Structures are given as structure tokens and as C-alpha cells.
Image (tube, coloured by chain):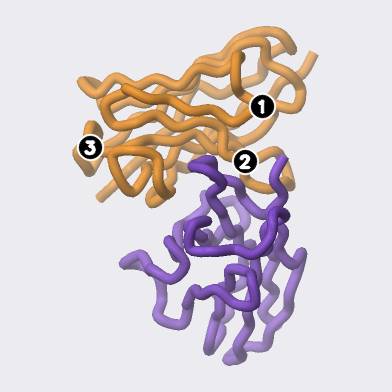
Chain colours: A orange, B purple
Amino acid sequence: QVQLVESGGGVVQPGRSLRLSCVASGFTFNNYGMHWVRQAPGKRLEWVAVIWSDGSNRYYAGSAQGRFSISRDNSKNTLYMQMNSLRGEDTGLYYCARARNAYSYGFEYWGQGTLVTVSP
Amino acid sequence: QTVVTQEPSLTVSPGGTVTLTCASGTGAVTSGHYPNWFQQKPGQAPRALIYSISNKDSWTPGRFSGSLLGGKAALTLSGVQPEDEAEYYCLLYYNGAPVFGGGTKLTVL
């Protein structure tokens, strides 16, 4: 069965960096686009970034543009999110999700999330 | 920032029918917004239910259906079960960029 397992979250000071990982199993990883979606405590879901199956294209939400970088290693079935210059408003649960195709459409399967807390 | 609006909360009796809606701040929702619906229970990750207006995932119970209704995307639950109590999020696409709605907290009472 499809499994997505995120890691790398933690408590970090404003302005610092963090790298999240998402290990995928149960499907052919290099056939699907992958997303990061976050959810601040008690708030709505917010799409953060997507990367196509071959890594050729990446797209970001405005809140992530210039600070976050999505990448993937298809040989390791792993998705990454490098987050720099973190702010308090970046606090939340970060989910990875598999797209429905090789590009960016849809959010078919979700991991359980990894918690990022940005606090002085 | 494009706004996608849902009812904050709805209450339905077990066995009843309820329709949740999803409105676009830019006008009528169309097939070009590729509406998606997700269910999220407390402490759990979201789960996909419906994509491209009305297509169901293999795990989506038959009592869930999606449609376009009055310029909005709609999710209808017919024969509601207690386990359907959850937060429901819609998602619309704007020129390829996905935007989630604020969520509807559905109470089964």
C-alpha cells in the first residue's frame, strides 16, 4: 500500500533553516508529482510547493517563493523541502502528498505530517 | 490572494442528507477549477474523497457525491453516518495553482 512518511520537523528559531524529508513506498515514486502542504494549528490547509515526477519543474506558493526549495531523489524514493529564513507564520504541520499524475494535479495520498515550530 | 469560501459549520442528523458548498472569490466555479474534496478527522491527515468535480477515489463511500451547483462546487452526503463527522476541505485550481477552502466542520447529531 502507498505510504508517505515525513520527518525533519522540530523547534527552530526565526531566521534559521530546516530540511524536511518524505520517504515514499508502495508505488513507483518516479512516476508521480509530489506536493508539500502545511496546516497551521487550527487553520486551513495551505499548499506550499509541488515538484514534477522527474524534477524538471517546481512551483511554489507565494508564501514559500524565495525561501523554500522543493527537491526529490528518485533513487531514494524521497522528497525534500529545504526551508530557509523561517518565520513564526511557518509554524504548522507539514504534509507531503502524492499527485494523481506525473505533474502537479491532485492530492491522492497523504502522509501523517511532521510538525515545524518556529519560536524564539 | 484568491479566496475559496466554505460554510464554517453544518449540522446533520444521522441518516440525513447535507450539501457542503465551495465558492470562488473570482466568480462561478467551473470544471476548469477541477474541484477536489478532502475529509480530515481530528488528529489525522486529510484524505482525498472527490476530484475533478465528481470522480470518487476507490475508498470513497457511495453516499458521497460531488457536483457543480448554482455556481459553486458541492459535496453531498446522503444517508449520513456518525463516522462522517469531520472537517471537509474543498480545493480549486487557479491557472494551475491549488487553493484550499477554509473548511466546513460537519457535526452529525
| Residue B102 seen by the camera | no
Residue designated by label 1: A63
Relative height, residue B9 to residue B90 (above, below) = below
Q: Residues within 10 Å of mark 2 (few under 14, many from 20)?
A: many
Residue designated by label 2: A46
Q: Residue flagged by tag 3: what amino acid is it?
A: Asn
Q: Residue at x 52, y 59 (%)?
A: B38
**What chain does mark 1 sit on?**
A
Indicate the position of residue B65 as horizontal and vertical percent values.
Answer: 47, 77
Q: Residues within 10 Å of mark 3 (few under 14, many from 20)?
A: some
Indicate the position of residue B93 as horizontal and vertical percent values.
Answer: 53, 49
Q: CA distance from mark 1 to mark 2?
A: 10 Å
Residue designated by label 3: A31
Which element type, helix, strand or loop, lies under badge 2? strand
Q: Residue at x 51, y 38 (%)?
A: A95
Q: Is residue B6 left or right of residue B47?
A: right
Q: Which badge, 3 or 1, is on the more N-terminal residue?
A: 3
| Residue A9 seen by the camera | yes
**Do tag 2 and tag 3 residues touch (Cβ < 8 Å)?**
no
**Do tag 1 and tag 2 residues touch (Cβ < 8 Å)?**
yes
Which element type, helix, strand or loop, lies under badge 3? helix
